[in-house]
Image (spheres, grey):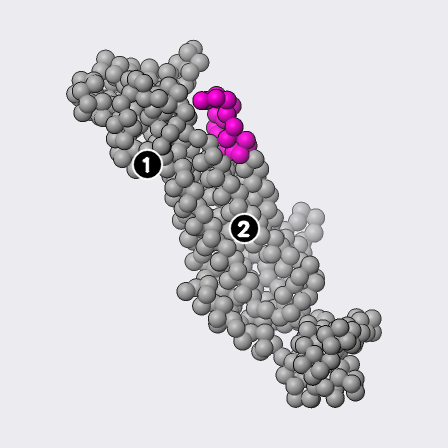
């Protein structure tokens, strides 16, 4: 990923330096188990840990000659650790190191992404409770529907990110597996106890059956979850973008003192951060398909998945981390305009109360079809003649014989729409 959309904590995880450090930990853990089993001399693991140094440039120089990254890594380690390092990797295959290490990087990334989600949940909870009863219009198909509150919008996002957190925890568990099973996964040249030791040492689970590689359905699940989270990021970003449109302008991204919105038009305050999140979310979701396609490898293994994962591993996690942090910042600093929300509620001159009038007519004995037709007729007149629905209904003798004046007044009131907000908030923030 380019530096513009990267944060150091995640880029460090996916650095070459960290990758080789994890490889070394896997090799040392395996050597420890081999020593306990008497398969290699004691002291190998401690000597390697003490003397081995990660030299990324040297590893790359060796790989340029031998055309094999794990061999290049082991050669570099041996150069520093000495003759005892020749006992490393006994009975193991490259995938044992690569797959176990890749899973560790995914878990490391997932832990940071969980912290990111926690921050979003914290901000959403605070803002939702602050605007619990801030009236705004609910829209369906982009058209005014009925009143809601801005707090309800935010509570909906909060509940979605709660689900995302659970999904990510499950996805991390899915990829928290370790395979040290040797060529084609049969343990022909390595004791299964070594795998158990490495898994325990590194905080992983033993892969029940590996075919020289850890099955890629696990990774497909992880990247699919990242794609879903990205979808949630875009859902919030899209809402912010719509609500900042000039015709709506119910909220606005924070605009700093010296910020410029347009090179041509000095008046512009554009929702650039939310638009940016929309683009980044597309990128994260685009990595889901290749992860799914990685499931179907040839026989016990091939490396068609390798180049894919070298790209999507860092890119998907780094991009999503950046996006989640940007979203938390937007939500924390966004400027909300409650008065404009009220203006927009009143924009359609009472049309948003049409359902309640219809329902009241059905209670009085009229059929639903007739009640609907009567109210729809007045609603159309409101649109075409720019009149207030309350005034038209008040002059309809048939309706006023069915609905009392006091009842009509109570219908054209927000309070009935907000009577269950406390219930919803208890469900969400329990």
- Residue marked by disc 1: 204
Q: Is residue 327 or residue 420 the one in the foreground?
A: 420
User: Gap between marks 1 and 2, in whole Å?
Assistant: 29 Å
Q: Position of residue 232 (x, y in %)?
A: 54, 50
| Residue 237 point in image, percent of width and height | 58, 52
**Quarter occupied by residue 146:** bottom right
269 or 191, which lies in front?
A: 191
> What residue is rendered at 78% in x and 73% in y?
373
Q: Is residue 182 left or right of residue 46?
A: right
State which region is magenta.
Answer: 290-312
Q: Is residue 37 above or below residue 234?
A: above
Find disc 2 in the rendering and name its residue: 232
Q: Can residue 186 be seen from the camera position used here?
A: yes
- Residue 89, compared with residue 289, is above or below; it is above
> In the picture, residue 335 is in which quadrant?
bottom right
Q: Residue at left 43%, top 50%?
A: 166
Residue at the far top: name it.
Answer: 65
């Amino acid at each position: 990923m380019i530096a513009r959309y990267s944060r150091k904590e995640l880029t460090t995880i996916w650095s070459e330096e960290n990758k080789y450090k994890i490889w070394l930990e896997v090799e040392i853990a395996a050597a420890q188990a081999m020593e306990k089993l008497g398969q290699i001399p004691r002291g190998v693991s401690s000597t390697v840990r003490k003397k081995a140094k990660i030299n990324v440039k040297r590893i790359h120089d060796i790989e340029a000659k031998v055309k094999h990254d794990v061999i290049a890594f082991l050669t570099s380690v041996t150069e520093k650790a000495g003759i005892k390092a020749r006992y490393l990797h006994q009975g193991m295959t490259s995938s044992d190191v690569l797959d176990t290490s890749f899973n560790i990087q995914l878990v490391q990334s997932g832990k940071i992404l969980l912290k990111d989600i926690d921050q979003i949940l914290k901000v959403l909870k605070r803002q939702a409770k602050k605007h619990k009863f801030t009236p705004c219009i609910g829209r369906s198909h982009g058209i005014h529907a009925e009143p809601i509150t801005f707090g309800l919008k935010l509570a909906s996002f909060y509940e979605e990110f709660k689900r995302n957190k659970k999904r990510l925890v499950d996805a991390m568990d899915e990829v928290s597996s370790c395979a040290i099973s040797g060529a084609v996964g049969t343990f022909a040249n390595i004791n299964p106890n070594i795998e158990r030791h490495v898994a325990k040492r590194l905080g992983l689970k033993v892969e029940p059956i590996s075919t020289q590689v850890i099955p890629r359905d696990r990774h497909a699940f992880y990247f699919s979850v990242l794609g879903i989270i990205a979808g949630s990021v875009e859902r919030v970003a899209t809402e912010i973008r719509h609500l900042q449109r000039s015709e709506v302008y119910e909220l606005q991204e924070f605009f700093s003192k010296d910020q410029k919105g347009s090179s041509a038009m000095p008046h512009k305050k554009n929702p650039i951060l939310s638009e940016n999140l929309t683009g980044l979310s597309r990128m994260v979701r685009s990595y889901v398909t290749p992860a799914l396609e990685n499931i179907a490898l040839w026989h016990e293994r091939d490396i068609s998945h390798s180049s894919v994962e070298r790209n999507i591993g860092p890119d998907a996690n780094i991009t999503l981390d950046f996006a989640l942090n940007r979203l938390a910042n937007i939500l924390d600093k966004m400027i909300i305009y409650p008065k404009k929300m009220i203006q927009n509620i009143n924009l359609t001159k009472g049309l948003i109360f049409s359902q309640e009038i219809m329902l009241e007519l059905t209670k009085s004995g009229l059929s639903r079809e007739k009640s609907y037709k009567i109210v729809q007729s007045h609603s159309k007149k409101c649109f075409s003649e720019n009149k207030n629905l309350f005034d038209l209904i008040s002059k309809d003798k048939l309706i006023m014989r069915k609905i009392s004046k006091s009842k009509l007044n109570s219908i054209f009131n927000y309070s009935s729409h907000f009577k269950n907000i406390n219930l919803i908030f208890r469900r969400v923030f329990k």
